[in-house]
Amino acid sequence: MKVLDTEFARDFIRMCNDGWTFGWHEANGGNASYRMRPEEVAEVRTGFRTRPWVRIEAEIPTLAGEFFLITAAGSHFRNITHDPKRTLGIIEIDRTGTCWRECWGFKDGTHPTSELMSHLINHEVRKAATHGTSRVIYHCHPASLAAMTCVVPHDSAVFTRTLWAQLAECALICREGVEVIGWEVPGSVDLAIESAKAMEHTSVVIWPHHGLFVAADDMDEAFGKAHAVEKAADIFCKAHACGLPGVSQITDQDLVRFSREYDLGLARRNVYAKPYGGAERPKASSARDAANDRPATVPMEEILRLPGAFSLPVASSAAQVVEPEVAPTPSQPQPEPTPLQSRPEPMPVQPQPEPAPMPTQPQPESASVPVQPMFEQPAFEQPQPQPAQPQSMQPNMQPQPHTASTQPAGAQPAYRFYPKARSRTS
Ligand code: 13P
Ligand code: ZN
């Protein structure tokens, strides 16, 4: 079979073209790669013509013998559908995981993306992190996300919480949160290494003033993650750009309920991070709260008294949740966890009271939990240190090995690097 007739190649090209039509690939901006399945390699390898092996600047032993469909350096995404054999190619990794060679495509002397190191090393990291299911890496340059990196501190929890505060789907689709790394030179080994450290515990990495770097099992998931993050960033930018004071966003309590009802496992460090530009305890936005005539800002204690609520250590308010000495245990019998993608039962429809008219200026909710205008933080204010939190919202869950950006002491990354220039070995 011809490469361009396969389903994986067609899916890959469609993902690239979708990114182009969304405006995420100016000039040659962005790149993508797909780790082929053995049966897909078998289908097309009769058409391969191999070129010389090239030394990799790292050892990637767990990718030995793998084949990747990958974009060519300097290729414009707008041309991929029109000229796939020049803008794309397939490479093979040798049996030692230290060399690669071209075997299809790269017509007219093109070569793999300048971000090849980032792709290979991060494929290795994600392959290990997902027990082999992760196959796609997609890098794009969406504008709203880049704009957000100009004003939101580069703290991964604050950045994640700010994205989640805008759009519920972003928490659903990007439930591990995002990691924001420092600015690095595009195409550099440092960029590859910093991304790989982040990708040990998330599949969505933000390259400030540059773009998004996403890993996923398939093209739909890769594009969907990029789309959800960029859409949340776009909402953030539009809400700030309109110049009106913010009065509502998704609250910690909203996220707690969301995480519990959809079994999302949202990490507490992200849920309780303060959204940038947000109110201290912003007004709860759910219709159910309004229908039940509950105070707009629902105290955490009240949420925990709801039937089926799991036990969280709380002090007098949600803002004062403290680290427990032992793993939290449920205070009452727990409902069966909701399957990952299933939707919860719809709430019974209750007579809706007339919604209160929106105040023209944000009003304090109560003396103890004041609602502040959302967008008053000065730019580049450093995030407040967050109280130490257990790692997951899920009851009885063991702390996750990674949710912070730092490597645990003594941890050995699976990849090793040689600070060598690339050289052809034959
Ligand atoms: P390439 O054209 O080499 O893929 O580089 C584009 C890019 O976005 C670099 O980060
Ligand atoms: Zn880029």
Image (cartoon, rainbow, N blue to C red):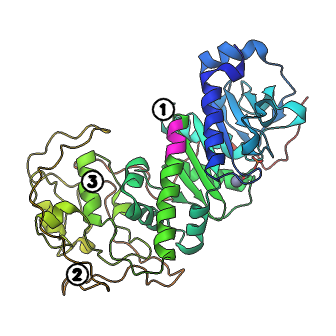
Identify the mark at residue 5; answer none if there is no mark.
Answer: none
Q: Is residue 256 above or below residue 341?
A: below
Q: List the residue tagged with mark 2.
A: 369
Pinpoint residue 302: horizontal percent, then vertical percent. Answer: 12, 66
Confirm whether residue 203 shows in the render. Answer: no
Q: CA distance from mark 1 to mark 2?
A: 45 Å
Q: Is mark 2 within 8 Å of ligand 2?
A: no
Q: Is residue 94 magenta?
A: no
Q: Nearer the viewer, mark 3 or mark 1?
A: 3
- Residue toward you, 346 or 388: 346
Pinpoint residue 210: horizontal percent, then vertical percent. Answer: 66, 60
Q: Earlier in the sequence, mark 1 or mark 2?
A: 1
- Magenta region: 220-224
Confirm whether residue 419 shows in the render. Answer: yes
From the image, which quarter does the C terminus lie in?
top right
Query: What kind of residue is marked 1?
Result: His
Q: Is residue 222 magenta?
A: yes
Q: Is residue 305 above or below residue 410?
A: below
Q: List the residue tagged with mark 1.
A: 131
Q: Earlier in the sequence, mark 3 or mark 1?
A: 1
Question: Does dot 3 land on a helix, a strand or a loop?
Answer: helix
The residue sitting at 39% across, 75% down in the picture is: 278
For label 1, count other residues whose C-alpha is less than 10 Å away and answer few (under 14), some (14-19) or many (20+): few
Q: Is mark 3 within 8 Å of ligand 2?
A: no
Query: What kind of residue is marked 2?
Result: Val
Q: CA distance from mark 3 to mark 2?
A: 22 Å
- Residue toward you, 138 or 265: 138
